[in-house]
């Protein structure tokens, strides 16, 4: 079962549903089964393996992944069905890959896994878009998982994705423990870590400042007719007037004062 | 997204339903060899026994009697050049028991040869044959070049 087959099968199923609906709405005429081609459904453990004709193949060509725009025009049920088709396809590819590895053979066209994964990611994106749109319409909120900026246990800022807890914060003594006065966050080790960490950041900033200042000085040394406004715009943190007057900024020419 | 963000378990209905499960399962050759109705899987680390049972029954329509799982430790090995320790990932293995009446044998996927391989073998054999013939021909006349012949 390869991707192109999956796509065709999926298109057939959607066509099938539409056609049969029309038939039932218009009249009670029985559908002629012969002009509808569907692949027979296999519910078996053999779905974990590729179709038999591909077993010894060294080159299996498949189509591309599903694009976002193609998925956006599908209904929710269609997306749901497609998800399971892709899930089975991915399981099959994983199984074949592992078996190839164990038999020391090359797994033909491993990019198939990436294509399936990309399609699945796209489906998820589309479902998410719809979810957000629905929530915004109904509640005015996105319905996404709330994220909060917090200071974590070692005193660094962190984006915390909220989740449900059995106990509320104010009852949860175990949660509050590290944050009290003599708790973990105010312990000697953490304070020491934060001190060194801040020092490191401060040093980096200082180095950057010195580097820029030196660079501006040398610019003036090499290019005496430099446009000062432009230098100021380029290096806003540097005191350009001061840099211009220094010894390093003097080139091998008479200074213009 | 709501399908990736699991709320806490609470008693009563409706229970949580997974609409787009992201679990994967690999069917692997059973090791050590098992009864014919026991199959072995590698699966996502997050899957529970109930997940595995539901996954197989609902998505693959395979009846499941019993599921046992274990987490096998990844191998430790030393890097050949540098000597630092490398560890393979841990794996969750699932041993699934099918009903007594069912049997599953892991298929031999690479036993059949492709046309290319068959052709290659054929040409190799022909080359062998022609070489043998040449040796036979020149057995009794050493020191004579191969082109000196009728």
Image (cartoon, coloured by chain):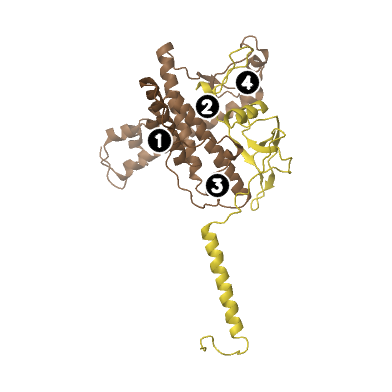
Chain colours: A brown, B yellow
Residue denoted by label 3 = A52
Q: Which residue is mark 1?
A: A35
Pointer 3 chain: A
Asked if the residue at tag 3 contacts the one at tag 2, i.e. Cβ–Cβ closer than 8 Å, the answer is no
Tag 4 and tag 2 share a subunit = no
Q: CA distance from mark 4 to mark 1?
A: 72 Å
x 67%, y 40%: residue: B104
Letter of the chain that mark 1 sits on in the rendering: A
Q: CA distance from mark 1 to mark 2?
A: 33 Å
**Chain label for disc 4:** A
Q: Element under label 4? A: helix
Q: Secondary structure at mark 3?
A: helix
Which of B126/A214 is in front? B126
Q: Are marks 4 and 2 in contact (CB under 8 Å)?
A: no
Q: Which mark is residue B20?
A: 2
Q: Which numbered disc, 2 or 3, marks the residue closer to the eye?
A: 3
Q: Residue at x 45, y 47 (%)?
A: A61
């Amino acid at each position: 079962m390869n991707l192109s087959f999956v796509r065709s099968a999926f298109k057939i199923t959607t066509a099938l549903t539409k056609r049969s609906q029309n038939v039932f709405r218009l009249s009670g005429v029985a559908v002629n089964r012969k002009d509808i081609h569907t692949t027979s459904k296999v519910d078996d453990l053999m779905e974990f393996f590729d179709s038999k004709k591909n077993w010894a193949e060294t080159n299996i060509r498949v189509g591309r992944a599903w694009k976002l725009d193609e998925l956006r025009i599908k209904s929710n049920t269609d997306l749901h069905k497609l998800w399971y088709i892709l899930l089975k396809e991915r399981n099959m590819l994983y199984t074949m890959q592992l078996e190839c590895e164990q038999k020391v053979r090359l797994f033909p066209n491993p990019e198939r896994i990436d294509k399936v994964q990309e399609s699945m990611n796209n489906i998820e994106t589309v479902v998410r878009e719809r979810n957000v749109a629905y929530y915004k319409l109904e509640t005015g909120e996105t319905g996404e998982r709330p994220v909060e900026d917090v200071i974590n246990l070692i005193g660094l800022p962190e984006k915390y994705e909220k989740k449900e807890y059995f106990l509320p914060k104010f009852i949860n003594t175990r949660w509050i423990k590290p944050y009290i006065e003599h708790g973990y966050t105010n312990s000697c080790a953490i304070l020491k870590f934060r001190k060194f960490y801040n020092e490191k950041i401060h040093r980096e900033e200082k180095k950057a400042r010195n580097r820029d200042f030196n660079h501006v000085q040398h610019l003036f040394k090499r290019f005496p007719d430099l446009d000062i406004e432009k230098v100021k715009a380029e290096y806003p943190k540097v005191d350009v007037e001061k840099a211009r007057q220094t010894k390093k900024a003097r080139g091998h020419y008479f200074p213009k004062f | 997204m709501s399908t990736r963000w699991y709320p806490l378990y609470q008693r009563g209905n409706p229970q949580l339903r997974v609409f787009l499960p992201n679990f994967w399962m690999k069917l692997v050759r059973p090791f050590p060899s098992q009864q014919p109705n026991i199959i072995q899987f590698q699966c996502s680390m997050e899957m529970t026994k109930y997940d595995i049972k539901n996954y197989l029954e609902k998505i693959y329509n395979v009846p499941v009697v019993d599921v046992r799982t274990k987490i096998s430790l990844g191998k430790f090995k030393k890097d050949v050049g540098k000597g630092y320790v490398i560890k393979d990932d841990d794996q969750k293995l699932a041993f699934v028991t099918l009903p007594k009446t069912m049997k599953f044998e892991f298929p031999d996927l690479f036993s059949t040869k492709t046309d290319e391989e068959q052709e290659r073998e054929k040409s190799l054999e022909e080359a062998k044959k022609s070489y043998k013939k040449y040796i036979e021909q020149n057995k009794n006349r050493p020191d004579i070049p191969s082109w000196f012949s009728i």
